[in-house]
Image: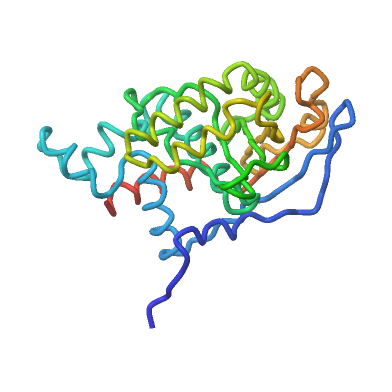
C-alpha cells in the first residue's frame, strides 16, 4: 500500500530538546533540533510545498513558455537562488531558514502564516526585503480579542564555515528593525493577498493594522539555525536582548541539524526536478 502522509510531514522533524540556555541578560533560549531523514515520500511532498513559495504549480507553465524552458530550467534559472555562484548559496540557506521557521511558526506554534514573501521575488540571488516571517492568531474572526496575536520572527542561518558566528545576536538585532517596518510589512502582505484574489484573507490583515484602536498582543522572535558542528552554546549565551523594544515578549530559539547545506541543495533539486 502506498504511504499516505500529510503534506507537511517534515514538521514532525522539529524536536524540542528540552534544554534551555540563558542569555547574558537573563533571557531564556530554547534549543531545538531538526532531525531530518532520507524519506523519499516526505522529501518529495516537502519539495512541492517549498517550490510553491516561489511559484505555484499551476502557474509554472504560463511563466516559463516565453523562455522555452522546461519547468526545471525555469525554476533553476529564473526563480531559485543559484547553487554555486556567489551569493546564491547563502541566499539559498537564508530562504530555506525563513521558510523552515515559517513552517515552525504555523505548525508548531499554531499561527496563520500567509506565504506571500517569495512569489514576486524579482532578483533570485538577493534576499527579500522586509520582516522575515509574520504569523497571526485570531481567536474569533467576528470579534476582536486582546489575546489576538501578531508574531514577527527573524531567522538567521549558518550552515558552513569553520568558526561559529553570533547568528542569534544577528537575529535579535534585525528584529529591532521589525518595530519600524511592521506597518510596511503588513501592507505588503495585504497587497499580495489582494492581487491573488484572496480577499477574505487580505481583510484579516486589517485586524493588526491599528494597534491603538484595536489592541492585540505583539510577539517578536529571533531564531538562529546552525549546522550541528557549528553550534556553540557559550557564544549563544553571550547574546543580549535588553535593547530590544519588545524584549519582554521576545522568543529566542536556536535550532540545529546535521548536514543542513546538503539538505538545502537536495530540497531545491527536488523542487525543480519534480515540478
User: Measured along the vertical axis of the image, is residue 48 above or below residue 199?
Assistant: below
Which residue is painted at 27% across and 51% down in the image?
A: 275
Residue 114 pos. (x, y %): 48, 41
- Give the colour scheme shown: rainbow
Position of residue 193 in the picture relative to residue 30 (left or right): left
Position of residue 240 in the picture relative to residue 79 (left or right): right
Q: Nearer the viewer, residue 95 or 38?
A: 95
Q: Nearer the viewer, residue 179 or 84?
A: 179
User: Measured along the vertical axis of the image, is residue 246 above or below residue 93?
Assistant: above
Q: Extreme right residue here?
A: 26
- Position of the N terminus, as image quadrant, is bottom left
Which residue is painted at 43% across and 55% down in the image?
A: 46
User: Measured along the vertical axis of the image, is residue 28 above or below residue 108?
Assistant: above
Q: Examine the rendering and report whether any part of residue 258 can be seen.
A: no
Position of residue 7 in the picture relative to residue 226 (left or right): left
- Determine which quarter of the picture holds residue 76: top left
Which residue is painted at 35% across and 31% down in the image?
A: 82
Q: Nearer the viewer, residue 203 or 6?
A: 203
- Determine which quarter of the picture holds residue 23: top right
The total of numbered circles placed on residues is: 0
Amino acid at each position: 500500500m502506498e504511504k499516505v502522509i500529510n503534506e507537511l510531514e517534515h514538521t514532525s522533524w522539529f524536536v524540542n530538546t528540552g534544554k534551555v540556555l540563558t542569555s547574558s541578560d537573563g533571557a531564556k533560549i530554547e534549543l531545538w533540533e531538526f532531525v531530518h531523514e532520507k524519506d523519499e515520500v516526505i522529501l518529495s511532498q516537502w519539495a512541492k510545498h517549498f517550490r510553491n513559495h516561489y511559484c505555484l504549480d499551476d502557474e509554472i507553465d504560463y511563466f516559463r513558455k516565453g523562455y522555452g524552458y522546461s519547468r526545471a530550467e525555469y525554476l533553476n534559472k529564473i526563480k531559485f537562488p543559484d547553487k554555486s555562484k556567489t551569493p546564491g548559496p547563502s541566499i539559498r540557506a537564508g530562504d530555506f531558514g525563513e521558510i523552515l521557521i515559517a513552517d515552525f511558526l504555523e505548525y508548531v506554534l499554531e499561527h496563520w502564516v500567509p506565504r506571500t514573501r517569495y512569489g514576486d521575488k524579482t532578483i533570485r540571488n538577493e534576499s527579500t526585503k522586509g520582516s522575515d516571517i509574520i504569523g497571526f492568531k485570531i481567536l474569533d474572526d467576528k470579534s476582536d480579542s486582546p489575546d489576538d496575536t501578531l508574531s514577527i520572527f527573524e531567522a538567521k542561518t549558518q550552515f558552513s564555515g569553520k568558526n561559529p558566528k553570533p547568528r542569534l545576536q544577528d537575529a535579535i538585532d534585525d528584529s529591532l528593525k521589525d518595530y519600524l517596518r511592521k506597518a510596511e510589512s503588513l501592507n505588503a502582505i495585504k497587497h499580495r493577498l489582494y492581487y491573488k484574489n484572496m480577499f477574505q484573507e487580505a481583510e484579516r490583515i486589517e485586524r493588526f493594522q491599528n494597534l491603538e484602536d484595536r489592541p492585540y498582543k505583539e510577539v517578536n522572535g529571533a531564531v538562529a539555525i546552525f549546522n550541528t558542528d557549528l553550534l556553540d552554546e557559550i557564544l549563544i549565551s553571550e547574546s543580549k536582548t535588553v535593547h530590544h523594544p519588545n524584549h519582554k515578549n521576545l522568543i529566542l530559539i536556536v535550532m540545529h541539524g546535521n548536514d543542513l547545506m546538503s539538505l538545502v541543495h537536495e530540497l531545491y533539486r527536488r523542487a525543480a526536478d519534480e515540478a
